[in-house]
Image (cartoon, helix red, strand yellow):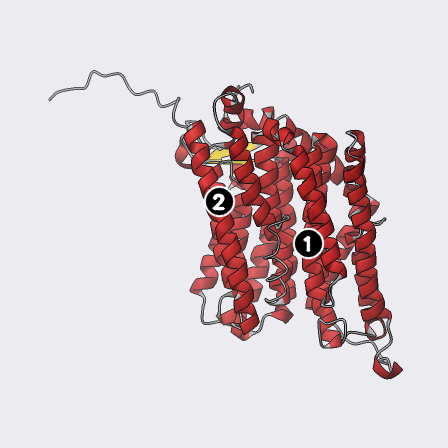
Amino acid sequence: MAVSTSPPADLSAALVLEPVAAADWLVILPVAWCLAIGALLVMLRRPIGLHPFIAIAGLAGLVVIDALLLHHVIVSGPVTMVMGRWLPPFGIAFTVDLTGALFALAASVVALAGGVYSLCDINDSGRRYGFYPFLMLLMAGVSGAFLTGDIFNLYVWFEVLLISSFGLIVLGSEREQIDGAVKYGFLNLVATTLFLVATGYLYASFGTLNMADIARKAEGLRGTAPLMTLTALFLLAFGMKAAAFPVNFWLPASYHTPRVVVSALFAGLLTKVGIYALIRVTVMLLPMEREELSFVIAVVGALTMLVGVFGALAQSDFRRMLGYLVISGIGSILAGIAVGGPGGIGGAIFYALHSMLVMTALYFASGVAAKLGGSFSLSSLSGLYRRHAGFAAISLMLAFAVSGLPPFSGFWPKVMLVKAALDIGAWWLAAALLVTGFLTTIATGRFFLLAYWRDTAGGQGAADEAQIPVAILLPLGVLTLLTLAIGLYPEPLLATIQSAAAGLSEPSSYLNSVFPGAAR
């Protein structure tokens, strides 16, 4: 019998041979957890009444997992896990740094709040048509987008969350929802196509789609590869996903059509995934190109802010106004990306996290207002303060928060962005930020005065406060308390955000987690 004399193959250059540390499994656990809970919900189609409680328990578990992941990254630095043990750039990598972990935790908190709110907003018909499996699939896509270390898989997770969002937006099959879904779907498919084109162009230029590999190769290819074209394509694709001017018109045409909880989840999560992708690609992978396009990004940011806030001022429907405020907030984040540096990038991250919490809570508030007043229209809403003074106080706090007023979470990122703009001499951008905040105060104040403070028709107010279900009041109150707590004591979050911004601008620790010992 012949015996092979060839030496054993050395797999150390291609495969991970050491056992994976137990804590490192947290990197992929959020995605696996969401997919597993979603699959369980699909299998349990008959006892439909169990769906909300399984989903809420799953989302609570997701919050715990993401909190543990954030703690692990704070203690150990960026963490990488590759699929099939193949070393990067051959294996698909999940790489989590402080930015991704912060976004993932904020997203899970928003989703848990939405799950609790849905107890009173999603009826049996919505449950039968799959609200909760779609919600878990949405969170799998959102979590995957925040945690992946591969550009193509970022595209894949975008597709996953888009598929689930299509199912959520048409839930109910009303004419208005179908109309909103068509507008939402068409523009997002265009953006996804641009993203795919840019990804193919990127692979042709770099020969890799691993983010860390791209970051370390970009400097050497700067003179030969069309990096400015690539950056412009990504800017357009992600700008459309985030509803930046001038490709923002799909958002206010669609976000007011689905159920309130779906609108709230969309406002808190979907545009922020686009912003996260834009920050990741332009700040960490292509920083020189971001610097060259900074003026263009700043102009787009200023126009997005002003178009959003002027649109909000013109609205007489609560949810339509909130859609424009989402757009205005995206402009503020773009201003931070344009300014760059620790102040600008940190302010952009802080504002995005703040917006995820506050805009979700404001959509919840719009649902409560419609339940108390019977309509989302300002012409019909009145006397909400008389009906429920506690709810009116919560709404006023959220109006202050979204306007960037102290002592709420929106104040600190606004200060960071204005200071960062002034530090580089961009006084006009700082002025746009301040004017936007002032006009947002007017827009939300107008709504509060007319819908809450104005007396009911004929001067007859409700004698007793209306009862708001605990399932609605609890998530609304918790999100409001979070915005207040961040505003009153921002230091721990601010320190983490500053470290996250520094890690994006100088990603040596990120690169070392993917390629140990690599130097940029």
Closer to the camera in the image, 511 or 327: 327
Residue 152 appears in the picture as rendered: no
Image quarter of residue 174: bottom right
Of callouts 2 and 1, the N-terminal one: 2
Residue 498 figure quarter? top right
- Label 2 crowding class (10 Å Cα cut-off): few <14, some 14-19, many 20+? some
In which quadrant of the rendered image does the N terminus lie?
top left
Q: Residue furthest right?
A: 459
Inspect the image, locate mark 1, and give the three-letter code of the amino acid beneath it: Val
Tell me which residue sits at (78%, 46%) in the image: 486
Quadrant location of the C terminus in the rendered image: top right
Nearer the observer: mark 2 or 1; the answer is 2
Residue 184 in view: yes
Q: Tell me the quarter of the picture where residue 147 sits.
A: top right
Disc 2 marks a residue whose amino acid type is: Leu
Q: Tell me where residue 436 appears, x and y as whole percent.
A: 78, 49
With 253 as the anchor, is 448 left or right in this view?
Answer: right
Vertical position of residue 314 compared to residue 31: above or below: below
For this view, does 517 lie left or right of residue 502?
Answer: left
Q: Position of residue 411 (x, y in %)?
A: 81, 46
75 to 408, vertically: above or below:
above
Residue depicted at x 69% and y 57%: 324
Label 2–label 1 contact, CB within 8 A: no
Q: Secondary structure beneath disc 2?
A: helix
- Secondary structure found at label 1: helix
Which residue matches tag 2?
A: 194
State how far apart marks 2 and 1 are (Cα).
Answer: 23 Å
* Residue named by callout 1: 326
Q: Position of residue 88 (x, y in %)?
A: 44, 29
